[in-house]
Image (cartoon, grey):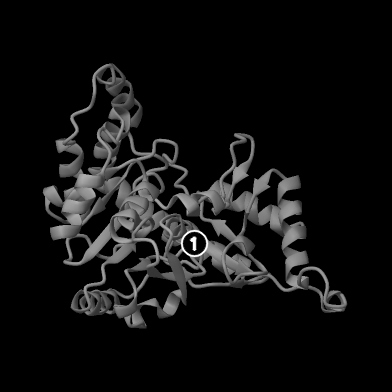
Amino acid sequence: MDPDAIRTADRVPHGGSTDPSVLDFSANVNPRVPEGVDEVYAASLEESRRYPDDEYPDYREAAAGYVGCRVRDVIPAPGGLAAIRLAIESTVEAGDTVAVPFPSFGEYAREVRLQGADPHFVPHDEITEIDPADHALAIVCTPNNPTGEAVEPDALEAFAERCRDRDTPVLVDEAFLGFTDRRSMAGREGVIVARSLTKLFGLPGLRAGFAVATGEYRDALETARRAWNLGTPAAAVGAHCMRQDEFVRETRERVRSERERLRAELEDRFTVFPSDAPYLLCELEGEEEAADSGGAGQSPAGDAVDALLEHAQDHGIALRDARTFRGLDGHVRIAVKDREANDRLLEVLGDE
């Protein structure tokens, strides 16, 4: 990292509540976990009295089967964000520019800036249309966070090919792709894939993920990866989860069904964006008379967001304030939970 950039960098706001009494719709985490997780975790504690095998053979094998790539191309990481950082610090130098989608995950721009490089912001639905020649790296998020749309596979493949022709690597963040049946870009030449296990499998505090890369990028990531960078419990539970095919299928179907049910109910109040992900981006409209503010303060839609967040909080529900995403000023993001939780959300929002 660039020392000067570190001194001027800020933290990025995220969703997620640490209060167990709050019904948390601000974090896009599966409310269910696969069977057997408790037993696997407990058994791994005794093994934690020794250093883990730094090759992580079982974890790599499970990950390779999970996304369909070669075992050797899997790079273990303590979470998807760690994989993103590893990819960026291995490909970007101070003074470079990186094509970054917006609105999208705020950590991309932060990690680019920590390298002393400059994020070049591109509308997320236009990122695969750019000329990557002038950038050290291009980043794609699919499904995009917070808007929810997955990039069409053919468009992504074509973009990756153009990037290869110009020697520009592509970082594809597939943190939420497991909620869909779309194919991974793992194993494609010139592509670095970042995967998070903790969202689909409902274990965000475990911190387990991985990157996938080939050729020189694979070698760079493997060399730069810290020794023992994945704890023994995370490696054991992660490998177990990635082999739970039936759990994944059931989760995809439940999320699809509940997402469409929520959309139908929420469209009476908000503009709801199309989504392939376990969340919905909702745009609010403010009262017209609130617009006459003399040019000061936030927008009427921003006032509406404040009121909605406060109302939900008063009823024990956390929503994601999507105004923290670049380019959004009157939006909230709502996670898709199980039917009971979703019913409670709709009840509270209906009372506002």
Q: x%, y% of residue 55?
A: 16, 36
Count how many numbered circles sit on residues in the image. Answer: 1
In the figure, residue 50 lies in which quadrant?
Answer: top left
What residue is shown at x 33% (from left), y 21% (from top)? 42
Task: Name the residue: 33% across, 78% down.
Answer: 134
Residue 171 location, x and y as percent?
A: 31, 63
Determine if residue 188 is in view.
Answer: yes
Q: For the view shown, which residue lies furthest in the front direction?
A: 4
CA neighbours of label 1 inside 10 A, class few (<14), some (14 to 19), many (20+) = many
Name the residue tied to disc 1: 259
Q: Find residue 1 and report its horizontal and vertical position in percent.
A: 39, 51
Q: Is residue 100 above or below residue 39?
A: below
Going by the numbered disc 1, the residue's amino acid type is Arg
Quadrant in the picture for the C terminus: bottom right
Tell me residue 136's x, y (percent).
32, 69
**At 49% across and 72% down in the image, what residue appears?**
274
Q: Is residue 14 above or below residue 291?
A: above
Question: Could you say which quadrant of the image residue 239 lies in?
Answer: top left
| Corner quadrant of residue 16 | top right
The answer, for residue 149, to whether it is visible in the render is no
In the foreground, 187 or 311: 187
- Position of 27 compared to 169: left or right? right
